Image (tube, helix red, strand yellow):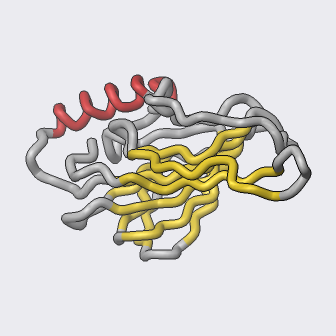
Amino acid sequence: MPTHDQPLYRRIVTGSAASGRSTIVSDDRLPVSNVLGIVDFWQTNAVPASLTESWQAEATPKLLPSAGGTIFRFFEIPALTNAASHQELVEQAKQAFAAADAADCQVDTTRHPMMHCTETIDYVVLLRGNVTLILDDAEIDLEPFDAVVQRGANHYWVNSADTPALFLGVLLDAKST
């Protein structure tokens, strides 16, 4: 969905050299990489996480962390445009979630075609823009540096501005029981 020039976000990974001294392991730039506006900086497969295991960004990021894992990411919500019809938005949403291996996360899209529900606890901070968090029975406006603890609720972030909104998110695999 992002229709703007894709920025590159810098990722610096530290670690320990064979000598035991701290060092820069990598310093690279990562693009926003799919129709969900995701750029993943790091993922883990278990908690506690390994301090020596490496991770490489995938060409097409998944929406969800692996079982027992975490994801550290930025994500962008595109500016709201009136160019697409409701049916086109529904199709775009289906394609986006299918590409992120998360088609089953769209449980009730009554309020917005991009609404979704995941079995994760997400720590989310709005970094740039103004958005409205939409839930099944509520909505709330957010400003930069507002933080949301998203606990497996059906939701979406609507950006009514003319520029993309930028979020920081840390997703933790969770269970509903």
Residue 140, x across and y down, in percent: 44, 68
Q: Nearer the viewer, residue 136 or 24?
A: 24
The vertical placement of 158 against 88, above or below, is: below
Instruction: Tell which residue pokes out farthest to the front in this image.
Output: 19
Q: Is residue 65 left or right of residue 114?
A: right
Residue drawn 24% across and 64% down? 163
Residue shown at the point (43%, 36%) measured from the top left:
108
The residue most toward the left is 83
Question: Where does the image place residue 66, in percent across and percent down from the top left?
Answer: 68, 30
Q: Position of residue 116 (x, y in %)?
A: 47, 39
Residue placed most toward the observer, 1 or 41: 41
Can residue 39 be seen? yes
The quadrant in which residue 139 appears is bottom left
In percent of width and height, residue 129 lies at 35, 70
Residue 136 visible in image: no
Residue drawn at x 58%, y 38% as measured from the top left: 118
Q: Looking at the image, which is closer to me, 65 or 49?
A: 49
The residue that appears at 18% across and 32% down in the rendered structure is 87
> On the picture, is 21 further left or further right than 43?
right
Would you place residue 69 above or below residue 39 in this image?
Answer: above
Disc count in the image?
Answer: 0
> Height in image: 99 above or below 146?
above
